[in-house]
Image (cartoon, rainbow, N blue to C red):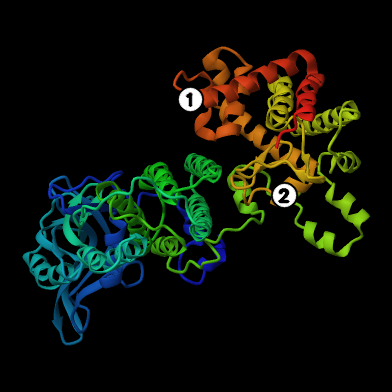
Amino acid sequence: MNCKNFKSTGYKPCLRLAANWFVIIAAAFAPAVFASELQIPVTLDYRVLEQALDKQLFSGPDRTVEVYADRINCNTMQLSAPRIEGTISGQVHIFTTIRTHIGTPLGKRCLRGKSWNGVLDTVHETNIDVERSAITLVIVDSNILRSDEQRSSFPRVIQKRINEYIHPQLNAIEIDLRPAVTGIQDLVGNAVVDTGDTLTAMVSSLKLKTARPLPAGLDVVLSMDVPEAIATEQAAEENTLSEEELAQWDSAWQAWDGFATWLIKTTAADADPELVEALVETLLEARYDLRSALAIEDRNSDPVRELFLTTWQRLAPLLHGSQPDLPGNQALAFATFIAAADALTALDRVAPYIGLRLDKQSFRSMARLLLPVVDDSDIAYDTAVDPVLRQLLGLEADFDEGSDFNEVHATSSLLNWFFRSAYAGDIPSDLVAQLNNWVPTLQDIDEYLKLMAQLLDELSDAEQAKTRVPVIFYPLYENLLRATAWQESCWRQYIETSGEVQPLQSSAGSVGLMQVNKHVWRGIYNVESLSDNVGYNARAGNEILVKYLVDYAIRKREHEITGNNDNLARATYAVYNGGPQQLTRYRNPDTSKALKKIDNAFWKKYQAIQQQGPKAVKQCYVDVLVNPLD
């Protein structure tokens, strides 16, 4: 996300979602009593009301308004610094500092003048205007308090002037929810598969239903009429997607990935560390889900809908409970965005027969609910390394991502390009150069494994110097790195197919020695270097392993919970293979047989590395050379 886009629009860079409560939105929808009505609850923090007060009344310096003054300022009344509180009884209290001066004008003189300072407490109830999608506050009572907000007696003339001059102005304050209503209408209109009169009627039915003040904020409910299901004959079996449909699916999942990445980066900007950590985990889980979806070869459905619903189920509670520091208009925009996404999930749940079409257009509509100035380039799918994204994941921003790869390849001699691209940061370039493009045979397997073991040793030595892995766990980490490379690729970066040397790649896009997935780690590593450079691939896989070992397995005390330090390796590999939520799958009795088979295979390799060292890998390699794997 390019934060400079916000500077000219009044938005704080990247939303700065980090400080005080501004919006709390119900974590889930429930269908209304009426089967044909969908209720959309949105609880707006009183910051939204404060913005309305400031815009419509308290527009003077330091949030002041002069509500009365005679021609010589002998009699004046000024309000300032409004503060809003809700009550469990369903009322709003607006507390404002009140300064008054009462005297007797005589020509240009003011006789017997006296000043009173205190706090005005006005009590309001809410009315809604369905046609205008507006909430107005109606005064039902008011009290004059001392500066310490205790009751006090004031001259009757002050109360009279309050009734005459202040009440009418405060009664005119309203919250305009048209941006929320029209924004949700636009999103639903773009995301629903059905078109025509049915969709038009459903979208146009969205309206403001109720608004009730509560301590947490204004409890607003929008409602939408949902059409009844139309009985149709269901096809006996679904056909495989056509080439055109597959192309649409490719466009849709890239639009989803670009949008999800933008959203989490934007939300995490300047958020507190705990929220950032949760958001990062959500992003990684979303990408692991995408990897799994891409691995399905015989496709007969579009899984973008499921990707969206699954990720939003994880993300919504984080956004509902976030505590951002935003002005009221941005608070309303953020609340609208969350409510709109929630509305799609609710609509899918109560009326799945309608169908969702989640593509570039619908994701653009959703993004612009949050930030009207967002550009297509901000949410576009991009494989370039993003230093902001790396920092968000707790990785060093400066990683040799091979950004000059193409330029060097185009302008330098083959020899110069070969050695420059072979550079792998912590690994000697000459070692990488020897291993690049090498597919060993049975005759040279010993030399190959010797050099590959050296590469991993160089990498682990460099990692030890960085001190990210606690010293006590360093031997475990070394074995973890070797066993993971064995499990993932049998220590291979390349294979030979039809006489051509090619990077080892899975159907889901995992490549090379460490099988780093190009979709999961998009924007974090250079996807070309992952394929074409064994040293770069090794460094990337190692960096991921270290993050998962330190930030997940060790931090969450898997070794203490199980009483076995080696279980840190098992837990780390489970996350490496399946994502952050897989940390404990190796010891979970409900884990699927397929995943148990993977974890057991890793565990055997890890133990073999412990007992025999790198030479244990040879048995796998002989099998591979005799029976080559694709």
Q: Is residue 274 visible?
A: yes
Question: What residue lies at 31% left-to-right and 50% top-to-bottom?
Answer: 348
Across and down, in percent, residue 181 comes to 27, 64
Across and down, in percent, residue 276 comes to 51, 44
Callout 1, which amino acid? Ser
Give the SS element for disc 1: loop
Q: Nearer the viewer, residue 299 or 616?
A: 299
Q: Is residue 75 above or below residue 202?
A: below
**What residue sits right under mark 1 in the picture?**
592
Mark earlier in primary sequence (1, 2): 2
Q: Is residue 219 visible?
A: no
Distance from label 1 to label 2 (Cα)?
39 Å
Question: What residue lies at 35% left-to-right and 49% top-to-bottom?
Answer: 21
The N terminus - image quarter: bottom right
| Quarter assignment of residue 132 | bottom left
Q: Is residue 611 left or right of residue 551?
A: right
The C terminus - image quarter: top right
Callout 2, which amino acid? Asp
Give the SS element for disc 2: loop
**What residue sits right under mark 2 in the picture?**
398
Q: Is residue 64 above or below residue 527?
A: below
**Circle number at residue 382:** none
Q: Is residue 302 above or below residue 327?
A: above
